Amino acid sequence: MATGHGRVRGSYDVVAEEYLGRIGGELAYKTVDRALLGVIVEESAGGTVADLGCGPGHVTGWLVGQGAAVVGVDLSPKMVELARREQPKAEFRTGDLLALPAADGEFAAAVALYSVIHLEPEELLPAFVEMRRVLRPGGVLLVSFHLGDEVHRMAQWWGHPVDVDFHFLRTDTVAARLAEAGFAVEARLEREGLPEEAATRRGYLLARCPE
C-alpha cells in the first residue's frame, strides 16, 4: 500500500460519522450522477462494480439497489467500518488508489467519484494505471472531480481538525492521464454545482479499457 496518504486517511477517519450524516443522501438530488451511475450498472452487465473511494458506502448502496454486485474500497478504516454497517449487501475493503486490494481484471466497471482529488498531480497516472489493472478488458471507469487549477488545504472540516488537500482538476488534464494509462475516453461532461453542494463546478469522464 502507498504510504504517503496518511493525512488524507486520518482526516476522513475524523469526519466519517458527520460525512455520512451530511453527504450520505446526496444522490437523491444529483440527477446527473444517477444517470451516469446507471450507465455503469448497464455496462457492468452483471459483473462486479468497484466503488473506489467509497466513503461511507452511499454510492455503493445505490448501485446495489440497481442490482449490481459492488465492492467498495476506501483509504479510511473508519469509512469502511461505517460502509459495512450501512450497506451489508456489499463488500468493502480498506485500500489505497495506488495499490488497490483487488486482483487483475476483477471488476467489470468502476467509479471513482471525487476520490482522485486527493492525489498529487504526479499520482494521477499511476492511479489510473492501477484502475486499469483491476478492470477486465472492455471495462468502463467513471471519474468525477472539481474543476479548476487550485489546491484547497483544509485544517477544519465541519468543526473537526483535519489536514487534507483538495486538488481541483481540468477535464483535459484528467483525460490526458487516462489516455496515458491506456483508457479510451468515450464521454465527458461538465456541470455547475447544485444549491445543495459545495459551490464548485464538476467534471465527469467515462473511459474504457481496451479489449
Image (spheres, helix red, strand yellow):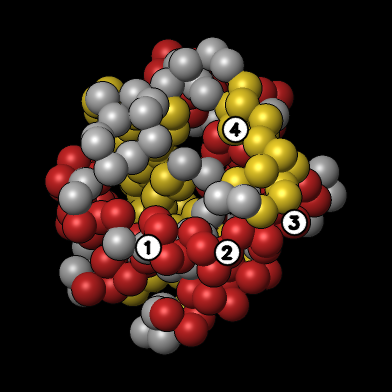
Q: Earlier in the sequence, mark 3 or mark 1?
A: 3
Could you tell me how far apart the alpha carbons at marks 4 and 1 are, in whole angstroms?
19 Å
Q: Which residue is mark 1?
A: 24
Q: Which residue is mark 2?
A: 16
Vertical comparison of 52 with 77: above or below: above
Viewer-closest of 195 and 111: 195
Mark 3 Cα within 10 Å, few/some/many (few <14, many 20+)? some
- The residue type indicated by label 4 comes to Phe
Q: Could you tell me if residue 176 is visible in this image?
A: no
* Quarter containing the N terminus: bottom right
Q: Earlier in the sequence, mark 4 or mark 2?
A: 2
- The residue type indicated by label 3 comes to Gly
Could you tell me how far apart the alpha carbons at marks 4 and 2 are, in whole angstroms?
17 Å
Q: Which residue is mark 4?
A: 166
- The residue type indicated by label 2 comes to Ala
Are the residues flagged by discs 4 and 3 in contact, CB closer than 8 Å? no
Mark 1 Cα within 10 Å, few/some/many (few <14, many 20+)? some
> Mark 1 falls on what kind of element?
loop
Q: Could you tell me if residue 159 is visible in this image?
A: yes
Q: Residue at x 59, y 32 (%)?
A: 166
Viewer-closest of 164 and 118: 164
- The residue type indicated by label 1 comes to Gly
Q: Residue 97: image x %, image y %?
A: 63, 49
Could you tell me how far apart the alpha carbons at marks 4 and 3 are, in whole angstroms?
15 Å
Residue placed farthest to the right in the image?
A: 3
Left or right, 52 with respect to 141, comes to right
Are the residues flagged by discs 3 and 2 in contact, CB closer than 8 Å? no
Q: Which residue is mark 3?
A: 10
> Mark 2 falls on what kind of element?
helix
Q: Earlier in the sequence, mark 4 or mark 3?
A: 3
Determine which quarter of the picture holds residue 14: bottom right
Q: Residue 78: image x %, image y %?
A: 64, 70
